[in-house]
Image (cartoon, rainbow, N blue to C red):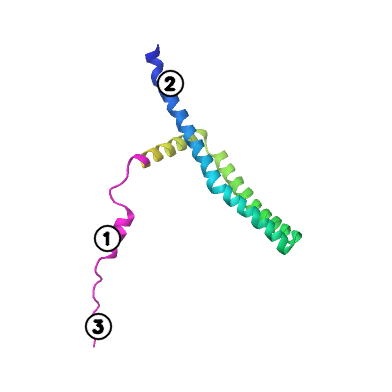
Amino acid sequence: MDYVLAPFVWLLGTLVSIAFWLLTQLFWIVLWLVLPIVVAAFVALRIAERVLGQDKVRAWVRARTQTYGAAASKRAQRWLFALGVVPVRVLFWFVLYAIWHSVVSLLWRPRWTPWQRAWARRWRRQPQLETKA
């Protein structure tokens, strides 16, 4: 019985390790990228409240929050409607295609890159225009 379950146990262990790796990467991204930005924004907000006045700054922040919140809400409504209209099997195949595309992109790269092509075209000689003298 161990021989039958061994591939499934290996697959489960691999999936758990991938999920753990993703969670740790997200944690470090939040810790080293997002957290300093949040702290800097908080400090800047407190400095602005002291310099410009608490009421002015809070009114400005409230206006921006309402504008961005309304835009985000509208965008989320559109996405939820679009996802609600799509059949479940299409969503299932979309997720599988996205995973397949990411795996293929990680394992295979084309021989040429757009930079190589652009660099090769950059040094091509330009045809000389005839000038009348």
- Name the residue that disc number 1 marks: 120
Counting from the top left corner in percent of width and height, residue 70 is at: 66, 52
Q: Is residue 66 left or right of residue 96?
A: right
Instruction: Work out whether 31 lies above or below 52.
Output: above
- Give the residue at the far right of this rendering: 55
Which mark is drawn over residue 131?
3
Counting from the top left corner in percent of width and height, residue 85 is at: 56, 40
Sequence order check, earlier mark of 1 and 2? 2
Sequence order check, earlier mark of 2 and 3? 2
**Secondary structure under badge 2?**
helix
**Secondary structure under badge 3?**
loop
Counting from the top left corner in percent of width and height, residue 103 is at: 38, 38
Q: Residues within 10 Å of mark 2 (few under 14, many from 20)?
A: few
State the image quarter where residue 64 is shown: bottom right
Q: Is residue 62 left or right of residue 110?
A: right
Residue at point 39%, 18% (across, down): 6
- Give the residue at the far top of this rendering: 1
| Mark in front: 1 vs 2 | 2
Circles 3 and 1: CB atoms closer than 8 Å: no
Q: Is residue 70 left or right of residue 10?
A: right
Which mark is drawn over residue 35?
none
Residue at point 47%, 28% (across, down): 16
- Name the residue that disc number 2 marks: 9
- What span is colored magenta in the figure? 106-133
Sequence order check, earlier mark of 3 and 1? 1
Q: Residues within 10 Å of mark 1 (few under 14, many from 20)?
A: few
Residue at point 28%, 62% (across, down): 121
| Mark in front: 3 vs 1 | 1
Given residues 50 and 75, the one toward you in this image is 50
